[in-house]
Amino acid sequence: MVRMNEERLHDIISALPTRTVAVIGDFCVDRYFEIDPSISDRSNETGLPIHQVVGVRAEPGGGANVLNNLAALGVGSVLPVGFLGLDGEGFELGRIFDRLGFERDGLQILPDRHTPVFTKPVVIRPDGAPEELNRFDIFPREPLSEEQEATLLEHLGAAFEAADALIVADYGEAGKEGVVTARVRERVAELARTQREKPVIADSRLHIDRFRQVIIKPNNFEAMEFLAGERASPPTLTRLAEVGERAAERNRQPVLITLGPEGALLCAPGRALKIPVYPSEREGETDIVGAGDAVLAAVAATLGAGAGVDEAVLIGMLVASITIQEIGRCGSADPDQVHRRFREYAREFPDVVGD
């Protein structure tokens, strides 16, 4: 049971404007090409069908979506640590960062690296939800230079000292070179060890097992593959609890395993607590893209605002249940939405919330 009432939730959320959260990671652009299927055409040269794009929009993606969620929750100061390319996508992200009031001291502008982009063609139909087609990823393929990595580590140290919490958002995948290198992971562990009272939480597509001294947030499949070396499909809750508890003991920090529509499993040595998520699908269609980013942002921010880890994960579940109701984009949640969802959650799961 997570003991929380609305007054306690208010105390945590109302502290966020006085807090600073640093984020090191891969700041990406989600570029959507909205296709109208009613307009048909073919190429004269190839005979292939032409997708007619009637709308283009750029949204914060990857680590930038974590930043966006922090801003929506009302965090007072957000410190991004990473890079922007000297390209159109870097300009788009810079404009978004400026609009949201983020400092740029921790960002390198690198003309030899392309800003990561997830290009998403989406078919728009008036009688149904958007249909996303095959994605095109543009991501750096070469590792950071020694000089770029050294500057990154310097910015990381400065941001950590100024922050109440640190998020590591590693979106590197096969064939992609992100900013969260082995040296960055080592430095994060060192910083976390020197200031154990400061929450640090990491999410990583491929290297979640390589973090030490910090809270880690794998999903259920990542936990089995990278923490246990198994590919159970689907993994049982009992087995996930065993894996999470063992990882928490080794890492000396809690392990948060997200379970999709089943919520989350919070593990510590000898203890695993399942925290359900509000069943948003009852209210219509849902889109899970970006839900993990929302959880990451909410947990780190509220831990930095003085929440206990159980409370922070519960708030993460509230935020994720709101963001997945935004179709065709990575969503976010503001404090008023979180309060409303808590009241709904308390009616749905009185045995979880307590009082």
Image (cartoon, rainbow, N blue to C red):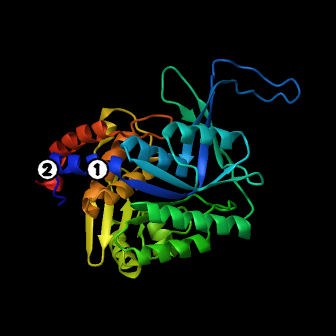
Is residue 212 in sight in this rendering? yes
Please identify the quarter of the rendering in which residue 266 is found: bottom left
List x then y, in percent, for residue 313. 31, 57
Mark whose residue sits in front, 1 or 2: 1
In the rendered structure, the answer to whether residue 97 lies left or right of residue 251 reads right
List x then y, in percent, for residue 229. 50, 75
List x then y, in percent, for residue 329. 50, 37
List x then y, in percent, for residue 66. 48, 50
Q: CA distance from mark 1 to mark 2?
A: 25 Å
| Disc nearer the start of the sequence (1/2) | 1
Residue count near mark 1 (Cα–Cα under 10 Å), binned few <14, some 14–19, many ≥20:
some
Vertical placement of 113 versus 229: above or below? above
Q: Amino acid at mark 2?
A: Pro
In the rendered structure, the answer to whether residue 113 lies left or right of residue 101 reads right
Q: Which residue is mark 2?
A: 350
Q: Residue furthest top?
A: 39
Q: Which residue is mark 1?
A: 15
> Are the two marked residues, 1 and 2, in contact with CB atoms closer than 8 angstroms?
no
Q: Secondary structure at mark 2?
A: helix
Report the front residue among 229 and 266.
266
Vertical placement of 41 versus 322: above or below? above
Vertical placement of 96 versus 349: above or below? above
Please identify the quarter of the rendering in which residue 2 is found: bottom left
Taking the spot 17% from the left edge, 46% from the top edge, the residue there is 6
Taking the spot 53% from the left edge, 52% from the top edge, the residue there is 63
